[in-house]
């Protein structure tokens, strides 16, 4: 199904970008009872970063390296529990095995401390307490692993989703509550008007139309600053585009995911069961090009296979790869920080025009999208002077499972 609501002349809130944050905000505002709210997506919903993630609904164990990110981890753990309850058919618990390397990598003590803190931050919202696991048990759950490379194994729990299906569920729920969407409709320009902003849009490359809006929320992810700059608006923050790739492989019999490390460059990567397949992925490489031209190149694929194959009984062959995909994390730049230590916390840039407000989102995570949308919704609702609370934490603001079926897995990916 393609959303094609008629382009309005004027709306109260115009959302640019149909990834998880744009759609989550539409759902949030619709749940507050707002009616004149509209979302534009230049492609199909979730075709940017939001269908190219690692699909984890998690606190983010590795973010515990920064004390300043503890609050982000805590909030993500609360959202993990909420999503497990609200959309149990799309978000389910997943056990992860963290093997401790014989040489290099994180020490057993550091991992134990990190997992204890992770459990403590989750409190009563945790999925399961972490434990150590014996090799025989690990091999039952991850039969492809070569245990001789490791001296100890920890087990901990997070959750996993189908990111595309989650975006579609939130979008359908927003529309059921009165939100409107136009896919294949690109925002081509934005200018300040007497009372807010004028945005020119183009459907399927056809005639340009104008939408006036009191509030515009730029949820364009890695496209956000290019859009502002091409309209002579100075972004509030410099952004970093951080490339991550994934490889889709045939099912390798995983009953749990693996949290693996590359000790030389301190990168981590995941090997996960996902929709009856195996998903291998990593992140952390700066990307300077256009977000429209991001893909997993041979160098990325060879790197990932080489790092992963060190730990497997039988190496993956390149010919086994069914498909690959790449996405860009969009983060506000923190001066003098490396990419892996740049916070996943969000930042909002704001620009006023008369009574109007243009908000640009930097950062965020799939896991915490709902609470971030609620914060932006609160900002808009209180700025307008008629505060109404969000309802997306309540099951009644969601459509039921089965009222929409996302595309089959292999319809989504081009074969490699
Ligand atoms: C490799 C990788 C792995 C990740 N793994 C996880 C994970 O496991 N768990 C987790 O919680 N988070 C994860 N994340 C983070 C998460 O995926 C992102 O934070 C989230 O998807 C960003 O969503 P968004 O809506 O901000 O941006 P996007 O999904 O990129 O949406 C922006 C949208 O804007 C559209 N657009 C662009 N220009 C225009 C225009 N001119 N007009 C109209 N529309 C336009 C694009 O087509 C796109 O759909 C991962 C990120 C990456 C890159």
Image (spheres, grey):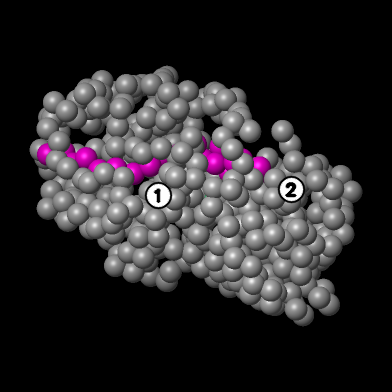
Taking the spot 30% from the left edge, 54% from the top edge, the residue there is 124
Taking the spot 30% from the left edge, 50% from the top edge, the residue there is 126
Magenta segment includes 161: yes
Res. 71 visible in picture: yes
Q: Are marks 2 and 1 in contact (CB under 8 Å)?
A: no
Frontmost residue, 286 versus 84: 84
Taking the spot 56% from the left edge, 62% from the top edge, the residue there is 374
Across and down, in percent, residue 348 comes to 56, 69
Say which label, 2 or 1, has the lower sequence index.
Answer: 1
Residue 181 badge: 2
Magenta segment includes 31: no
Sort mark 2 into few (<14), some (14-19) or many (20+) by Cα contacts within 10 Å: many
Sort mark 1 into few (<14), some (14-19) or many (20+) by Cα contacts within 10 Å: many
Q: Secondary structure at mark 1?
A: helix
Residue extending farthest to the right is 207
Q: Quadrant of residue 183?
A: top right
Q: Which residue is mark 1?
A: 81
Frontmost residue, 2 versus 206: 2
**Bounds of the magenta segment:** 152-172
Q: Is residue 296 left or right of residue 284?
A: right
Examine the rendered structure and indicate whether residue 377 appears above or below residue 84.
below
Q: Secondary structure at mark 2?
A: strand
Residue extending farthest to the bottom is 354
Q: Is residue 95 left or right of residue 8?
A: left
Across and down, in percent, residue 107 comes to 14, 50
Res. 239 visible in picture: no
- In which quadrant is the N terminus drawn? top right
């Amino acid at each position: 199904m393609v959303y094609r609501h008629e382009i309005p002349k004027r709306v109260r809130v115009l959302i640019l970008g149909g990834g998880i944050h744009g759609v989550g905000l539409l759902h949030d505002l619709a749940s507050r009872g707002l009616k004149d709210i509209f979302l534009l997506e230049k492609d199909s919903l979730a075709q940017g970063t939001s269908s190219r993630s690692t699909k984890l609904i998690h606190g983010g164990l590795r973010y515990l390296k920064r004390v300043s990110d503890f609050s982000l981890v805590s909030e993500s753990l609360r959202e993990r529990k909420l999503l497990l309850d609200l959309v149990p058919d799309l978000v389910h618990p997943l056990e992860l095995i963290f093997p401790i390397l014989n040489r290099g990598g994180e020490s057993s003590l550091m991992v134990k401390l990190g997992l204890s803190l992770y459990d403590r931050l989750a409190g009563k919202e945790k999925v399961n307490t972490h434990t150590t696991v014996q090799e025989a048990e690990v091999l039952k759950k991850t039969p492809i692993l070569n245990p001789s490379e490791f001296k100890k194994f920890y087990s901990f729990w997070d959750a996993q989703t189908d990111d595309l299906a989650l975006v579609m569920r939130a979008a359908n729920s927003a529309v059921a509550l009165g939100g409107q969407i136009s896919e294949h409709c690109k925002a081509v320009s934005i200018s300040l008007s007497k009372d807010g902003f004028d945005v020119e849009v183009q459907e399927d490359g056809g005639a340009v139309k104008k939408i006036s809006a009191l509030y515009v929320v730029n949820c364009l992810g890695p496209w956000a600053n290019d859009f502002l700059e091409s309209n002579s608006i100075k972004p509030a923050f410099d952004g970093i585009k951080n490339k991550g790739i994934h490889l889709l492989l045939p099912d390798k019999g995983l009953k749990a995911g693996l949290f693996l490390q590359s000790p030389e460059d301190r990168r981590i990567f995941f090997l996960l069961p996902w929709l009856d397949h195996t998903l291998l992925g990593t992140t952390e490489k700066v990307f300077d090009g256009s977000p429209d031209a991001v893909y997993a190149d041979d160098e990325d694929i060879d790197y990932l296979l080489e790092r992963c194959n060190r730990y497997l009984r039988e190496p993956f062959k390149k010919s086994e790869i069914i498909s690959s995909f790449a996405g860009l994390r969009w983060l506000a730049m923190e001066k003098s920080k490396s990419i892996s230590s740049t916070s996943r916390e969000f930042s909002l840039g704001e620009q006023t025009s008369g009574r109007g407000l243009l908000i640009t989102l930097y950062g965020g995570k799939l896991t915490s999208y709902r609470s971030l949308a609620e914060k932006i919704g609160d900002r808009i609702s209180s700025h307008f002077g008629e505060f109404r609370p969000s309802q997306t934490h309540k099951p009644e603001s969601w459509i039921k499972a089965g009222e929409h079926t996302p595309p089959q897995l292999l319809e989504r990916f081009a074969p490699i």
